[in-house]
Amino acid sequence: MSGITLAVPSKGRLEELTRDWFASKGLTITRPGGARSYLGAIDGMPEITVRFFPASEIARELIRGNIDLGVTGLDLIHETSESGPASVSVASKLGFGNADVVVAVPEAWIDVTHMHDLADVASDFRSRHGRWMRIATKYITVTRQHFAKAGIAEYRTVESLGATEAAPASGVADIVVDITTTGSTLAANGLRVLEDGVMLQSEACLIVSRTAAFAPQRKAQLDAVLSRLGTTAGF
Ligand SMILES: Nc1ncnc2c1ncn2[C@@H]1O[C@H](COP(=O)(O)OP(=O)(O)OP(=O)(O)O)[C@@H](O)[C@H]1O
Ligand SMILES: O=P(O)(O)OC[C@H]1O[C@H](OP(=O)(O)OP(=O)(O)O)[C@H](O)[C@@H]1O
């Protein structure tokens, strides 16, 4: 394959800020077919094909090596696959899209302030309530890794793709793992982040696929665009 592929968010909170970031480096991303087209370009750099994808698909395709370079949230790299972080390299942190993936419990759980308190709750849960502690989240991979590190195995995840913070009040789950920026959604739902409950600090990043960085025929073009953006592949 000649030329390299850059994937940028097609919609959502990262879309416009990504275009602004490239513009701040003197590169203009164009979308000649309009908002419904998924193909674009960078003015003056015909060797780069721009593709517009949702942020979560960009993470997946970078990890698989189907695209060379992309902008997406660090949380999505960690969540898409356990091997995600090892399959890519962060070339630049872009300074927007900042959010933390956190463990939050009902405010009423006053004795539960740290992960080790949660470990006690989890191990008592079954005898007290006749079931496992349930965690509502869309961050299944991140939760599994972080809870294993904290030595907590007695729980079940309940996959939640929207309104996760409502799950404890509605009885669907006991606690949540979710993304937060201002904390206002958690507070509005009577939830509190554990003091050591920040699992991941995420922001939008320019990310290089490991596959691309080791493809000899694309390496020079990749290095050239990264140098225009003031960075290197970092492998
Ligand atoms: N307050 C926030 N809530 C959720 N995600 C946020 C927030 N702030 C930044 N982000 C980041 O935005 C990225 C997700 O962007 P977006 O919601 O546009 O994704 P998407 O996958 O395209 O959307 P959708 O969930 O609609 O499919 C994630 O990397 C996430 O970390
Ligand atoms: O800490 P805060 O600043 O309150 O932000 C956190 C909330 O923002 C996001 O939801 P959003 O309403 O943007 O919708 P989404 O689920 O489609 O991302 C996210 O899923 C949280 O629910």
Image (cartoon, grey):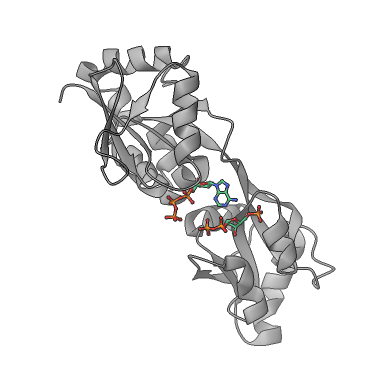
Residue 132 appears anywhere in the view: yes
Query: Furthest residue to the left?
Result: 1
**Left or right relative to 19: residue 183:** right
**Left or right relative to 73: residue 186:** right
Residues 35 and 120: in front is 35
Q: Quadrant of residue 40?
A: top left
Q: How many marks?
A: 0
Q: Quadrant of residue 233?
A: top left
Rendered position, 67 above or below 233: below
User: Which corner quadrant of the figure contains ligand 2?
Assistant: bottom right
- In x, y percent, where is residue 59? 39, 43
- In x, y percent, where is residue 160? 50, 68
**Left or right relative to 122: residue 34:** left
For the C terminus, the quadrant is top left
Q: Residue at x 48, y 55 (%)?
A: 141
- In x, y percent, where is residue 232? 43, 16
Residue 150 appears anywhere in the view: no
For the N terminus, the quadrant is top left
Q: Quadrant of residue 51?
A: top left
